[in-house]
Image (tube, helix red, strand yellow):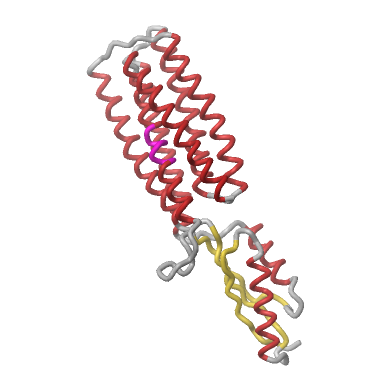
Amino acid sequence: MLRSKVRLTILGIILNTILFSVKLGGGIYSSSLALLSDSFNSFTDIISSVAIFIAVRLSSKQADRDHPFGHHRAEPLAGLMVAILAAILGFQVIMDSFESFFVPKSIIINRYVVGIVIFAIVVKLFMFIIFRIRGKGANSPALIASSVDYRNDILVSLSVLLGNILVMSGYRIADSIVAIIIGIFIIYSGLKIGMDNVEFLMGKKPPEEVIERIKKLALSVPGVIRLNEIKAHYIGTFIHVEVHIEVDKNLLTEKSHEIAKKVQYAIQSDELVDYAFVHVDPVPA
C-alpha cells in the first residue's frame, strides 16, 4: 500500500511540474492574466505534491521512543500547510487581477493557448479520478485532499478557457474577471482542504458506520455481555478506540483480562484502527 501511495505522489509531482511549465510559458507568450494565474495554482500543486510525498513516507514510519503512537498525523499536517499556502496565493491572484483593471495588458489569443487549457483539463481529470480512487481505497486524507484540489483545478481551467473565449469576442475585461474567479477557487480549495485536515488533527469522530463496525467486532468476542461505552477519534489517518465492555463479575481476573485482550485484537483487526483501549466493567451475569 505504501509503495503504491509513494508512486502516486511522485506521478503527481511530475504531472504538476509539466502543467506549471506549459501554463507559465503560454501565459507569458499570450499575456493572459488568467493563464498566468492558473500557472501559479499549478505551482502550489507542485508544493502540495512534494509535501504529501514527504508526509506519506513519514506517516509510514513505525512508532519510536518520541512518538509511541506512530507518525500518522503527518498526512493531515501536510494538507494543512498546503491549504494555508493556497489561500495566500489565492489572495495574491485576486489582488493582481484588480490591478489589471487599471493597467490594461495586450493579450494574444490563439489555438496554442486554448490547447494548453484543454490539455490541463484532461490531465487534471485523470489525476482527480486516480487520486480519488486510490485515496478512498487507502483511507488517505492527503490523497483525498489532493483529489479535491484537482477537481477544483478542472473548474479553474474551464474558467480560463471561458475567459479567453470572451476576450476573443471583444470583452477584454473578462480575462481579469476570470482571474478573480480563479483566485476565489484557490482560496476555497485551501479552506476546504484545511478544514478537513484540521478535523483529523483535532481528533474528529469517525463516521457512524465505522463506530457500528467496531461495536460488532467487540460484541463478537465470547464473554462480552454488552458494551457500556465506546469512544473513537482520528489520530492522523488512523483511529484510536476506547471501549468499556461488561463481563460476568464472577469471572476470575485472569479470564476477564483474556476477554479484554481478545476484544482489543478484534477491534484492531479493522484496517482503520491503530490501537484499542479496553476497560472491563464487571456486572451480574
Please determine whether, in this image, residue 254 is positioned above or below residue 143.
below
Residue 269 drawn at (x, y percent): 66, 64
Residue 11 drawn at (x, y percent): 50, 36
Q: Please tell me which residue is depicted at 39% across the width and 22% down the height of the picture.
A: 23
Q: Please tell me which residue is depicted at 53% across the width and 42% down the height of the picture.
A: 7
Image position of 274 (left or right of 83): right
Residue 224 drawn at (x, y percent): 72, 78
Asked if residue 59 lies in the magenta stretch, the reply is: no
Q: Nearer the viewer, residue 59 or 163?
A: 59
The C terminus lies in which quarter of the figure? bottom right
Please determine whether, in this image, residue 208 is positioned above or below residue 112.
below
Image position of 166 (left or right of 207): left
Residue 2 drawn at (x, y percent): 55, 50
**Residue 177 seen anywhere in this rendered image of the structure:** no
Q: Please tell me which residue is depicted at 49% across the width and 47% down the height of the picture.
A: 142
Asked if residue 45 lies in the magenta stretch, the reply is: yes
- Residue 165, by quadrant, is top left
Please determine whether, in this image, residue 41 is positioned above or below residue 202.
above
- Residue 188, by quadrant, is top left
What's the magenta region? 43-49
Q: Main secondary structure of the magenta part?
A: helix
**Residue 129 seen anywhere in this rendered image of the structure:** yes
- Residue 73, by quadrant, is bottom left
